[in-house]
Image (cartoon, grey):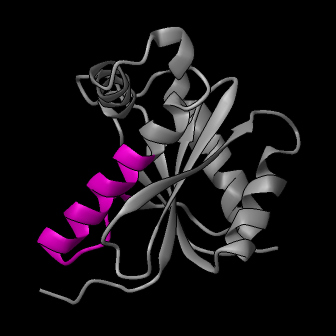
């Protein structure tokens, strides 16, 4: 089993309206919310700025498969967004299964007493935390990077 790769990672939950962002410490102990980025033409540039701000070595983008593990319209959207991030950031991007991250995020927020309406602004960040923490746990238990790499397009 190989060693856990040290370094800050960003977890990214891609949605149609918003992109939730979480990060971890260099030892991968804890994923914490960073911000919710509006999904517009400036979203990729904002994420690249966060990569530089936090000295990130890898991006983990949630891949929303359906419960049978099949692609959906959202899966295609996430793949395209991840490819744009890989091209713009110049660092490795990996797609990680996030089938239940948004559901888990809503449940955690509900359990903490927040209504669906009051959670809207942070649910994407919480989903990003869930997917990043799951990816870190997978790497620690298997010794292998989580998910699948997004091919780097030559600039």
- Decide if residue 29 is on the left or right side of residue 138: right
* Residue displayed at 24% across by 74% down: 144
Where in the figure is residue 41, as x and y percent of width and height? 88, 39
* Residue displayed at 27% across by 53% down: 134
Where in the figure is residue 68, as x and y percent of width and height? 23, 23
Residue at the front extreme, as displayed: 113
Prevailing secondary structure of the magenta residues: helix
The correct choice, above or below, for 133 with respect to 140 in the image is above
Q: State the residue in front, 33 or 18.
A: 33
Q: Quadrant of residue 17?
A: top right
* Residue displayed at 35% across by 81% down: 27
* Residue displayed at 43% across by 37% down: 127
The correct choice, above or below, for 16 with respect to 59 in the image is above
Write the start and end of the magenta stretch as one range: 129-147
Where in the figure is residue 52, as x and y percent of width and height? 74, 75
Is 137 inside the magenta-drawn segment? Answer: yes
Q: State the residue in front, 141 or 37.
A: 37
| Quadrant of the frame with the N terminus | bottom left
Number of numbered discs on residues: 0
| Quadrant of the frame with the C terminus | bottom right
Is 16 inside the magenta-drawn segment? Answer: no
- Decide if residue 118 is on the left or right side of residue 111: right
The correct choice, above or below, for 143 with respect to 62 in the image is below
Where in the figure is residue 49, as x and y percent of width and height? 79, 65
Q: Quadrant of residue 54?
A: bottom right
């Amino acid at each position: 089993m190989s060693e856990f790769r040290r370094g800050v990672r960003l977890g990214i939950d891609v949605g149609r309206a918003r992109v939730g962002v979480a990060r971890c410490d260099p030892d991968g102990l804890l994923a914490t919310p960073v911000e919710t980025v509006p999904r517009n033409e400036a979203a990729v540039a904002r994420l690249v700025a966060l990569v530089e701000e936090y000295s990130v070595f890898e991006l983990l983008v949630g891949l929303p498969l359906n419960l049978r593990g099949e692609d959906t319209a959202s899966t295609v959207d996430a793949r395209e967004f991840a490819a744009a991030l890989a091209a713009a950031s110049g660092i490795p991007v990996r797609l990680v299964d996030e089938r239940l991250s948004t559901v888990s995020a809503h449940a955690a927020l509900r359990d903490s007493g927040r209504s669906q309406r009051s959670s809207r602004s942070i649910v994407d960040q919480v989903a990003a935390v869930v997917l990043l923490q799951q990816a870190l746990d997978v790497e620690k238990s298997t010794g292998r990077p989580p998910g699948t790499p997004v091919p780097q397009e030559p600039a």
